[in-house]
């Protein structure tokens, strides 16, 4: 496959950065197509940890062209800080992506605060409010942001409107002059990277280049197909790639669904297979399950094949990359959630209404675990029998092959079972 999407199949944090980084060794282009710096991708190369929030995971490789496509929302200050860590890279930013401005962060925090117990548990990065402005047709595109004269006028009118809204929420005033001074600096910095990335990507396709599309978050956080309203404000699914990048739908050739060997979730919302015993703490510590962006402890659950089947269907997964298998070493018995019970009936799909989903209880099958340390494994055949059985059971429950898996955080701990790219 020459054009492959890497998509999270759960609630984000599945290890997409690591899988993208691994596959990117073969890629000419890595393209992020949605979200902003709410994402957190950790890539470890030769023991050195790199935390990426906005930048595509190919940024560490000077031969790869990195694309930040039109579906993204970009915080210029965060961009400036993140890119300053790197010297040798190739990058283009879509002139149609939208800009996250300081008041988006204020709204995000204030609206979460107002929701009280019903809060979404957002990352407070202003992502939802930036997409709200885009959908309301008042947002600022990157093309305006980097324009030598038009940015000032647009920013002034946006800040005046924002101040009126913030005042209504009992919040303080934003100072246009100081924001403008800083943002002018960020705009100058961003300008050389800005292009029509739909043209760039389509030119690359004509040249037969290999492109990896890197999803942020996970399918269950999708605005359309996720556990609404406890979702992000964009669509991480493979189906959103054409719209969010400006390539034809039929040019996407496949999608690898990155799946943790168990489940995690940050933020609020239902999670039927959540583990409430001390095992959750053990897995959290062993798997370092704390948010890359917010540092929040992640909720831990058993793997849930209802969710995986849902992600497979709405994202057209052609293979699974299973991550963090090593974290399950030492767990005596493993549960796999295969269906839910709702109002006394067994169901195999996720109800649309969040209140129904909250009432779902999980039905499990159990499998014996393994105790061996698998972090040095280099080939599927070297895995303990119970680990292979666990993986094969999941493959059969979701009728999709595990094409690669990882047994530790480093690049060399990712193992390809089948060549997909
Ligand atoms: P927002 O994207 O900041 O608006 O947050 C909405 C929901 O998506 C919250 O539950 C966040 O915790 C979750 N979320 C956003 N980005 C990520 C991510 O990269 N990993 C995991 N959860 C995320």
Image (tube, helix red, strand yellow):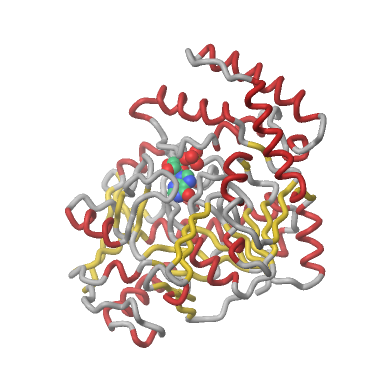
Q: Residue at x 65, y 58 (%)?
A: 31
Q: Position of residue 234 (x, y in %)?
A: 57, 44
Asked if residue 345 lies left or right of residue 136, the reply is: left
Question: Depth check: 185 or 325 in front?
Answer: 185
Quarter of image, res 134: top right
Question: Depth check: 334 or 28 in front?
Answer: 28
Question: Depth check: 97 or 270 in front?
Answer: 97
Q: Is residue 187 above or below residue 248?
A: above
Q: Is residue 217 above or below residue 409?
A: above
Q: Residue at x 74, y 25 (%)?
A: 154
Quarter of image, res 215: bottom right
Task: Examine the rendering and report whether any part of residue 352 can be seen.
Answer: no
Q: Position of residue 256 (x, y in %)?
A: 54, 67
- Image quarter (top left, top right, bottom left or bottom right) of the N terminus: bottom right
Task: Examine the rendering and report whether any part of residue 258 can be seen.
Answer: yes
Asked if residue 49 lies left or right of residue 355, the reply is: right
Q: Is residue 183 above or below residue 288?
A: above
Question: Depth check: 171 or 312 in front?
Answer: 171
- Image quarter (top left, top right, bottom left or bottom right) of the C terminus: bottom right
Q: Is residue 4 above or below residue 195?
A: below
Labels in figure, total: 0
Q: Position of residue 304 (x, y in %)?
A: 35, 59
């Amino acid at each position: 496959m020459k054009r492959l999407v890497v998509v999270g199949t759960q609630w984000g944090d599945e290890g997409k950065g690591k899988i993208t980084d691994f596959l990117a060794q073969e890629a000419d282009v890595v393209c992020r197509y949605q979200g902003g710096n709410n994402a957190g991708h950790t890539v470890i190369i030769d023991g050195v940890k790199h935390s990426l929030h906005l930048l595509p995971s190919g940024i560490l490789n000077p031969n790869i062209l990195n694309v930040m496509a039109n579906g993204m929302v970009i915080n210029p200050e965060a961009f400036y800080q993140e890119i300053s860590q790197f010297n040798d890279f190739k990058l283009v930013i879509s002139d149609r992506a939208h800009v996250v401005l300081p008041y988006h962060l204020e709204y995000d925090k204030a609206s979460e605060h107002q929701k009280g117990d019903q809060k979404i548990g957002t990352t407070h990065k202003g992502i939802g409010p930036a997409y709200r402005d885009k959908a309301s047709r008042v947002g600022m595109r990157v093309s305006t942001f980097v324009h030598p004269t038009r940015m000032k006028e647009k920013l002034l009118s946006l800040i005046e409107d924002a101040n009126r809204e913030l005042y209504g929420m009992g919040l303080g005033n934003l100072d246009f002059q100081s924001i403008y001074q800083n943002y002018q600096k960020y705009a100058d910095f961003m300008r050389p990277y800005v292009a029509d990335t739909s043209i760039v990507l389509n030119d690359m396709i004509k040249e037969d280049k290999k492109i990896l599309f890197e999803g942020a978050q996970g399918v269950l956080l999708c605005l359309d197909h996720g556990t609404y309203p406890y979702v992000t404000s964009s669509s991480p699914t493979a189906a959103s790639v054409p719209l969010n990048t400006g390539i034809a739908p039929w040019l996407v050739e496949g999608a690898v669904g990155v799946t943790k060997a168990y489940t995690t979730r940050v933020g609020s919302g239902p999670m039927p297979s959540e583990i409430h015993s001390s095992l959750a703490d053990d897995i959290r510590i062993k798997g370092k399950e704390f948010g890359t962006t917010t540092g929040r402890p992640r909720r831990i659950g058993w793997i849930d094949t209802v969710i995986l089947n849902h992600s497979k269907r709405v994202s057209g997964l052609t293979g699974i990359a299973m991550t963090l298998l090593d974290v399950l070493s030492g767990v005596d018995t493993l549960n796999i959630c295969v269906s839910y019970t709702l109002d006394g009936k067994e169901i195999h799909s996720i109800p649309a209404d969040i209140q129904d989903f909250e009432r779902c209880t999980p039905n499990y099958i159990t499998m014996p675990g393994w105790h061996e340390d698998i972090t040095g494994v280099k080939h599927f055949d070297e895995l303990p029998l119970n680990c292979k059985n666990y993986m094969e059971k999941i493959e059969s429950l979701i009728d999709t092959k595990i094409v690669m898996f990882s047994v530790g955080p480093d690049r060399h701990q990712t193992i390809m079972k089948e060549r997909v790219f």
